[in-house]
Amino acid sequence: MKNFNFKSYHIRGMNAETEEEKQAINQELKDLYESLTLEEKTEFNNQLQTFLVREVANIKSVYDATQSDDLN
């Protein structure tokens, strides 16, 4: 099983200084996807879904913590 490092793309995208740089990173990820076999694309999609769920949960956790701090 191939492990896709979505966090590295995510961090690079967040730190991109221009919209063109963000687009280049997104294109790099799209090109990677297109180079995969059907089986690898399935694994890519599964890993991406897991990464996104985890990131949203982390963001929600931080948001909830800031909201509870505001109430105190």
Image (cartoon, rainbow, N blue to C red):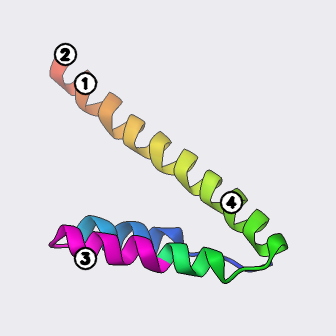
For discs 3 and 1, the disc positioned in front in the rendered view: 3
Q: Quadrant of the C terminus?
A: top left
The three-letter amino acid code for the residue at tag 2 is Leu
Residue 56 left/right relative to 14: right
Tally the marks. 4
Question: What's the CA distance linking mark 3 and mark 1?
Answer: 33 Å
Residue 67's disc is 1
- At x 49% / y 40%, what residue is drawn? 57
User: Neighbour class for label 3 at 10 Å: few (<14), some, many (≥20)?
Assistant: some
Disc 3 element: helix
Q: Which residue is mark 3?
A: 21
Q: Which residues are magenta?
A: 16-28
Residue 22: x and y in percent read: 29, 70
User: Given this view, does label 2 or label 1 mark the residue nearer the observer?
Assistant: 1
Badge number at residue 43: none
Q: Which residue is mark 2?
A: 71
Examine the rendering and report whether any part of residue 40 can be seen.
Answer: yes
Mark sitting earlier along the chain (3/1): 3
Residue sitting at 25 percent across and 76 percent down?
21
Q: In the rendered image, which residue does mark 4 sit on?
A: 45
Q: Residue at x 32, y 70 (%)?
A: 23
State the residue lying farthest toward the right. Answer: 39
